[in-house]
């Protein structure tokens, strides 16, 4: 049985553990600690990831998800969330593996994100990439004022000074030589307990990865996602009640040796 097929188990008399056989052997009982040097190094070079370093000494998983992306059937993305659902700001570990072998890990990202609803039809058109404009263009930019919505002014000023980008930051889309590239779509299934009796099903309408070089050989990853929760605890949410959200995800790539699972 697919470990995230909790919808089929909601009304079963004996719930089945759904958090077994996951990447890095993480489950709801896990405590995760991180080697802080790669994250501190990225921040001191101007990365926009939002994390209190002291918190990395002990993090508990509060939600687990599996993500399937159209056109990437041989791969699967797992996310281990460290914040309760509903938080505007989220921190999570994202792991990319082979679909049929979670021990074959291609990439590990430590991510911080902020979500917000689009403001009007213009925003929705942007995040949907309508008319080959908006999400899907070769780059995604934040001005200094834009960044003040994510961080305190002093923190933005410090990070921009560290990276030498005084006016703001620019992230380049994959295959940036193309003027426009349709974003990725998919689905994310999230569980909030080990038996999968509570959870959500999210439709990813658009998702686009970007990156920018930091000083030296370091890179910061940046992902823009546009999604809506379509089902909660196995109950379909009416379309008119599905609130689409834009999510800005700042991420640092880690090696498996940077992570300890207890």
Image: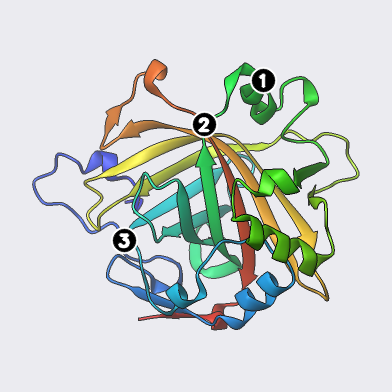
For the residue pair 154 and 249, the one nearer the viewer reads as 154
Residue under pointer 1: 122
Q: Residue at x 59, y 56 (%)?
A: 152
Residue 104 in view: yes
Badge 1 crowding class, 10 Å Cα cut-off, few under 14, some 14 to 19, many 20 or more, is: few
Q: Position of residue 23 (x, y in %)?
A: 45, 68
Residue 110's tag is none
Q: Earlier in the sequence, mark 1 or mark 2?
A: 2
Tag 1 and tag 2, C-beta contact below 8 Å: no
Q: Tell me if 47 is positioned left or right of 203 in this view.
A: right
User: How far apart, in angstroms, are the residues tagged by discs 2 and 3?
Assistant: 30 Å
At mark 2, the secondary structure is: loop
Q: Tell me if 180 is positioned left or right of 43 in this view.
A: right
Tag 2 and tag 3, C-beta contact below 8 Å: no
- Image color mode: rainbow
Residue under pointer 3: 19
Up-down relation of residue 178 to residue 97 (above or below): above
Quarter location, residue 138: top right
Residue under pointer 2: 117
Closer to the camera: disc 2 or disc 3? 2
């Amino acid at each position: 049985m697919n470990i995230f097929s909790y919808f089929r188990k909601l009304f079963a008399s004996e719930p089945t553990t759904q958090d077994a056989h996951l990447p890095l052997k993480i489950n709801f009982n896990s405590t995760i600690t991180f080697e802080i040097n790669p994250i501190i190094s990225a921040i001191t070079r101007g990365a926009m990831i939002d994390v209190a370093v002291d918190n990395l000494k002990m993090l508990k998983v509060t939600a687990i998800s599996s993500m399937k992306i159209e056109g990437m059937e041989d791969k699967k993305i797992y996310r281990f969330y460290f914040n309760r659902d509903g938080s505007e700001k989220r921190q999570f570990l994202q792991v990319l593996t082979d679909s049929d072998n979670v021990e074959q890990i291609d990439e590990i990202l430590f991510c911080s994100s902020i979500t917000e609803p689009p403001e009007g039809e213009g925003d929705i058109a942007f995040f949907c990439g309508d008319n080959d404009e908006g999400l899907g263009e070769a780059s995604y930019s934040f001005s200094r004022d834009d960044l003040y919505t994510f961080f305190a002014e002093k923190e933005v000023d410090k990070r921009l000074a560290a990276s030498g980008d005084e006016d703001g930051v620019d992230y380049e889309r994959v295959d940036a030589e193309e003027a426009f590239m349709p974003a990725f779509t998919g689905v994310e299934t999230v569980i909030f307990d080990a038996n999968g009796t509570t959870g959500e099903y999210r439709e990813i309408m658009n998702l686009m990865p970007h990156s920018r070089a930091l000083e030296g050989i370091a890179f910061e990853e940046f992902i823009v996602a546009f999604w809506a929760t379509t089902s909660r605890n196995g109950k379909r949410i009416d379309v008119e009640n599905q609130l689409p959200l834009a999510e800005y995800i700042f991420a640092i790539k880690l090696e498996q040796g940077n992570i300890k699972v207890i």
